Image (cartoon, helix red, strand yellow):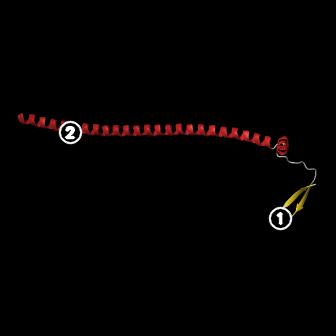
Amino acid sequence: MNYKNKYRQNYQLQNNRQLFSKVMKFFEFKTSWRVGLSILTLSLVLVYLFQINCLAITGFEIKELERDIYTSQQANKELTLQVAQLQSINNLEKVSQDLAMVKIDQAEHVNSGLASVALNK
């Protein structure tokens, strides 16, 4: 009877060790799986934050460029208006008087071989 008890105890101990080994392998797999999933999740969160940051920076750059375009368009309108004012007949007559230019009735062009010259009669 003593031998049977020892055999049962030995068998149970061996069974317990196998069961413990299986349980440890299961949890080992679960732990590595959880670690892998955690690393993947963290990586995806970091990529998401990086993309959001890039989008925010791009948005600020677009706003700045739109503001630059608007100011350039305003400056272009002002310069176009200024050119139109300077090219007006009234302005040209005023400038010619300020420079003491004389109004001519008829001009005669003379070819001197190299250049064409106008004479006042």
Residue under the image location 66 percent in, 38 percent down: 71
Amino acid type at circle 2 is Gln
Residue 44: x percent and y percent?
Answer: 43, 39
- Where disc 2 sits, the SS reads helix
Q: Which mark is residue 114?
A: 1
Residue under the image location 31 percent in, 37 percent down: 31
Question: In the shown orientation, is residue 5 left or right of residue 47?
Answer: left
Residue 41: x percent and y percent?
Answer: 40, 37
Question: In the shown orientation, is residue 95 left or right of residue 66?
Answer: right
How many neighbours does mark 2 have within 10 angstroms: few (below 14), some (14-19), or many (20 or more)? Answer: few
- Where disc 1 sits, the SS reads loop
Residue 89: x percent and y percent?
Answer: 85, 43
How many neighbours does mark 1 have within 10 angstroms: few (below 14), some (14-19), or many (20 or more)? Answer: few
Instruction: Give the quarter of the image for residue 112.
Output: bottom right
Q: Which residue is mark 2?
A: 18
Residue 25: x percent and y percent?
Answer: 26, 40
Vertical placement of residue 120 versus 111, above or below: above
Residue under the image location 90 percent in, 56 percent down: 119
Instruction: Give the quarter of the image for residue 118.
Output: bottom right
